[in-house]
Image (cartoon, rainbow, N blue to C red):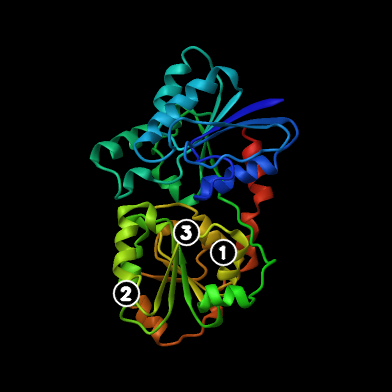
Amino acid sequence: MTKVSIIGSHGLYAKYGGWDQLVINLAEKKSNNIQYLIFNSRDTPSVDVSIPGVMVKKSIFKASGFEGLFYDFSTILQCYFKTDTILLLGIQGLPLVSFLSLFKKIKVVSNSGGIEWERAKFGYFAKLYLRMCFKMSLKYSDHVILDNEFFKRYLPDNANYKSTINVIPYGGEIDRSVSIDHNLSAKYSFLNAEYYLSISRSISDNMIEELCKSFCESKKELVLISNLSSSTYGRDILNKYSLTDNITLIDGLYDKPILDLIRRKCTAYIHTHTSCGTAPSLVEMAISKRPIFSIDKPQNRFTLNNEGFYYESFEKLVSYLESNPGLDMYIVSDIVNSKYSWTKVVSEYQSLY
């Protein structure tokens, strides 16, 4: 039995982003010879877990924001000497792991989640720290996971680092069990019309302010789903655009069957992420078989294998949409989607333990 501790996500059955979906699938699809200890963030609701071989422990700290560093360090200390493998989702705990390795060697698998030191939300010293942690991950991790092929460009030119490099994306699944009914039509009236959809976290890197501003000049309908009320940035967008006639803002939607219905029924999807790797929202839209318009970033092209439509500015995108182009050519092929099976992703993670 291999004991694996998972650190860095909001935890099991949290409803935030890619790491949280990854943790759910790692737990629910695990092999019988793996035993997981999963640390939940303080603000993740407690749930009964009945998966054999999976134990959840709630941290006294939140996994995000300033408390995130305390969350990582405290959870690492709790499990390091009792586990066979640590899976780090986020690398800010690497300095502590490197110190503890002087006393005991365990297997370390790390996933930075992206090029975090390039995100606008971090200050100068935070960026320096995250860049240092990434370099440490190459020295003190047995395996480093990159979720996008593009991130290999950030590896040192020399190959004198200890870790093996593994490109493992996030998976995706679409729930097709829900259909439009009277209640859903009343709650989400846009389902009965044409609408362009965008889904992202409420951070400036995802450029949702710029997206909303560009649609103010358009006759097209935009539906934006984001955790808007969770940040000052998002609350400002709510204040500015909640009364705009052709923009519908949905402040957090975590009911997956309903969310996937909105995905499946949209006219097309607009992807705005600039700093993440293989964005789970982009993967799930590709699987939804809807046309995709993605901001032109190398990691997005890797995710979609250059399929879909790529735009450089929101103004040019909206102008193009106003011309009512044919959209079916921007639906991603099944060949691309076959890479994003959760069963395949879980198997690749487990092979590293």
Give the label on residue 119, or none.
none
What's under tag 1, amino acid-wise?
Leu
Rendered image quadrant of residue 69: top left
| Number of dots carrying numbers | 3
Q: Looking at the image, is 331 positioned above or below residue 321?
A: above
Q: Position of residue 128 (x, y in %)?
A: 28, 36
Q: Residue at x 39, y 45 (%)?
A: 115
What's under tag 2, amino acid-wise?
Ser
Most distant residue in the left direction: 124
Q: Nearer the viewer, residue 18 or 233?
A: 233
Q: Position of 60 compared to 254: left or right?
A: left
Mark 2 / mark 3, whichever is N-terminal: 2
Q: Position of residue 333 (x, y in %)?
A: 61, 69
Q: CA distance from mark 2 to mark 3?
A: 22 Å
Badge 3 crowding class, 10 Å Cα cut-off, few under 14, some 14 to 19, many 20 or more, is some
Q: Which residue is mark 2?
A: 214
Q: Nearer the viewer, mark 1 or mark 2?
A: 1
Q: Residue at x 64, y 76 (%)?
A: 181
Most distant residue in the bottom direction: 323
Q: Which residue is mark 1?
A: 259
Q: Which residue is mark 3?
A: 252
Q: Position of residue 15 (x, y in %)?
A: 53, 50
Do we see residue 330 in this rendering? no
Q: Nearer the viewer, mark 2 or mark 3?
A: 3
Mark 1 / mark 2, whichever is N-terminal: 2
